[in-house]
Amino acid sequence: MLEPVGPLSPKTYWIRRVALVGIAVVAVLLLVWAFAGRGNGTPDSTAATTPTSGAPLTGELATPPSATTPTDLTSSLFPDASTAVSSPVPSDTAGTPSDATPTDGGAGTDGGTAETTTASATEVAPPADPAAESAAAQAAADAAAAQAAADAAAAQAAADAAAAQAAADAAAAQAAADAAAAQAAADAAAAQAAADAARPRDAEGRLICPDAAVQLTATVGSPTYTVGQQPIVGVTIVNVGSEPCVRDVSGSLQEYLAYDAAGTRVWSTSDCLPGSGTDVRFLQPGESLQYNIKWSGTTSQPGCAAERTRVPAGDYRIEARIGSLVSSQAALTFR
């Protein structure tokens, strides 16, 4: 009789028990059937059933063997045999049919079959549970989905953190740029304020026009005069700067000059008749002033020392000056 090898699951253990009980019951039934056949006068061999004479057989020998199958005999002799199959029997009881096997070949063969069946029952694997496999597969799928969701959440969190860091860096850079721009503006304003404070102003605090903000242009009443006439000469003053300012254009600062074609100075108002008076003007950007005088058409020397003579016919250039400012020249011709 085979014994279980190694630890068995409860399910495998009971399957083996039931198989052994079933084999034992079949063996018992075969033994009962065999003994019942002998008791009824069943011949042991073919030779016993052959008549020795040609007379017809009578009595029990003439009666054909019963057609009752071993299963029917078992049911009639042991009505509760089917119930006994389902009852678990300890392993030492399951080996009884093998011990009770008679010496004839039929019973021994049945015993061998029982051992073979028992060995085969040990190797049968329990059937798979589809519900359990489905649940396991679902659990694995759920775990994979949860892991994927966790990975996606982690990736999203990392992306959000990176975006937040980038936004913070951009904000910091913008703040630094704004601070630098504000500082630059403040520095420029301070420099402008310092420059404004350094620029000269009059007694009323008004900005005095620098030379670069004032433009002088010499003018003549007519480009041509007859010898002996007294030409009208003058100057135009324009504030070409971007700020309103004041400028002293008093007559005492004004000077008008004439040069001949060779460039020789032939006349100046500062020689014999310098200007006089005070004239300080407040000029808006682009605003202009015009001053005119009459030239006698004669020569002059510094300090009005030499005799003044009428200039001859020819081409001349008229120039005006106001303090340190010098105008462009205007052409004038005597005929």
Image (cartoon, helix red, strand yellow):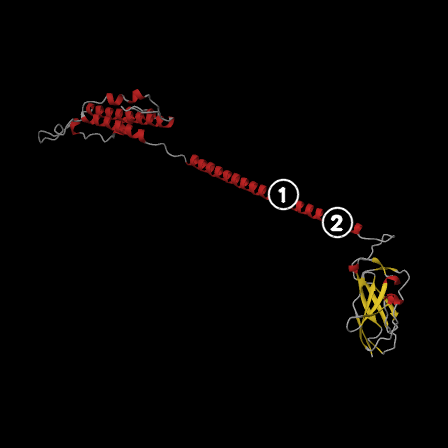
Crowd rating for badge 1 (residues with CA inside 10 Å; few <14, some 14–19, many 20+): few
Sequence-wise, the earlier of marks 1 and 2 is 1
Give coordinates of residue 223: x percent, y percent. 82, 75
Give the CA separation, mark 1 to mark 2: 34 Å
Q: Is residue 234 left or right of residue 143?
A: right
Picture layout, residue 300 above or below residue 241:
below
Helix, strand or loop at mark 1? helix
Picture layout, residue 151 above or below residue 333:
above
Nearer to me, 4 or 50:
4
Q: Is residue 59 left or right of residue 27?
A: left
Q: What residue type is labelled 2?
A: Ala
Nearer to me, 54 or 184:
184
Count all numbered tags in the image, as a single digit: 2
Q: Which amino acid does label 1 sit on?
A: Ala
Give coordinates of residue 128: x percent, y percent. 38, 34
Residue beneath the point at 18% across and 26% down: 105
Q: In this view, does 71 lie to the left or right of 185?
A: left
Q: In the displayed orientation, state which residue is furthest to the front.
A: 306
Picture layout, residue 283 above or below residue 163:
below
Give coordinates of residue 70: x percent, y percent. 25, 29
Residue named by callout 1: 168
Residue named by callout 2: 191
Residue beneath the point at 66% across and 45% down: 176
Q: In the displayed orientation, state which residue is furthest to the right.
A: 277
